Image (cartoon, rainbow, N blue to C red):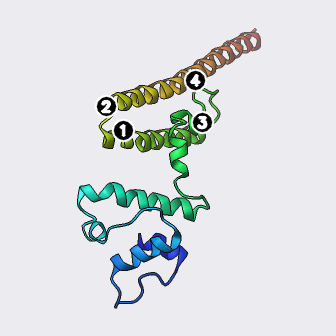
Amino acid sequence: MTFLLRKIDPSFNSSPKRKFEDDVVVAFKVFGYPFNISKTALVAAGSPHTWPTLLLSITWLIEVLEGGSGFDMLRDEFAGIESVGEAGQPFESVEKLEERTEKSFLKYVEISYGSFLSGDDAHFEKLEMELLEYHEKDNMAIEQAIERVMDENIAAEADCTELCKEGGE
C-alpha cells in the first residue's frame, strides 16, 4: 500500500511521528475512496477476515493510478471471461496466446473470488465450466494449426522426394 500511495504522494508516511494506519485512512479519504478503512484492519492485515476489504481498497487504488474512476472492474465482471478476448481464433503467436490465457485465468480468479466469498457454489461451477470451454476452444485452434503444419510438411516431403527422383534419373 505504501508503494502505491507513494506513486500519488512521494512523501506519504515519511514522518516517523505519524502512524501508518492513520496516514492510510486519511489518504483514502482524500482520494475519494467510497468506503471507510478500519485502522484495526490495517494493523491486523495478516488476518484472513481483513483481506477482502484491504484487497478491494488496493484494487481501487491501482485503478485510480491507471487513470480509471475506481471500481471499473465491477462492470467488467459481468462480461465474463470472454471479455479478455475471443477464444478459438486462428493461432497467430505463442506470445498473444499466452497473454490472453493469463488474462482469462486472472479474470476467472477475479470473478470466482466474489462467488467464493458469497458462497455461491452454482455460479462458481458455472465459471469453472466457462473457463474450461474457453480454453478448449483455444486447444482446438492449436490442434488445427498443428494439423495444417503437418499437412504442409507431408506435402514438402513429397515434393522433396519427387525432386530427388527427377534429379537421380
Residue 160 coordinates in the image, percent (x, y):
69, 17
Label 2 and label 3: CA atoms lie apart by: 26 Å
Q: Amino acid at mark 2?
A: Asp
Q: Amino acid at mark 4?
A: Ala
**Residue under the point 43% across and 44% down:** 110
Q: Secondary structure at mark 1?
A: helix
Is 14 placed left or right of 21 in the picture?
right
Please tell me how crowded label 2 is: few (under 14), some (14-19), or many (20+) other residues with Cα within 10 Å: few
Residue 88 coordinates in the image, percent (x, y):
58, 26
Q: Amino acid at mark 3?
A: Gly
Label 4 and label 2: CA atoms lie apart by: 31 Å
Label 1 and label 2: CA atoms lie apart by: 7 Å
Image marks 4 and 2: residues in contact by CB distance under 8 Å: no
**Residue under the point 36% across and 79% down:** 22
Residue 121, labelled with which disc?
Answer: 2
Residue 141, labelled with which disc?
Answer: 4
Residue 143, labelled with which disc?
Answer: none
Q: Name which of mark 4 and mark 3 comes first in the sequence.
A: 3
Q: Amino acid at mark 1?
A: Ser
Image marks 1 and 2: residues in contact by CB distance under 8 Å: yes
Residue 70 coordinates in the image, percent (x, y):
54, 58
Q: Secondary structure at mark 4?
A: helix
Q: Name which of mark 1 and mark 3 comes first in the sequence.
A: 3
Residue 85, labelled with which disc?
Answer: 3
Q: What residue does disc 1 label?
A: 115
- The answer to which of 53 and 131 lies nearer the viewer is 53
Label 1 and label 3: CA atoms lie apart by: 22 Å
**Residue under the point 43% across and 40% down:** 111
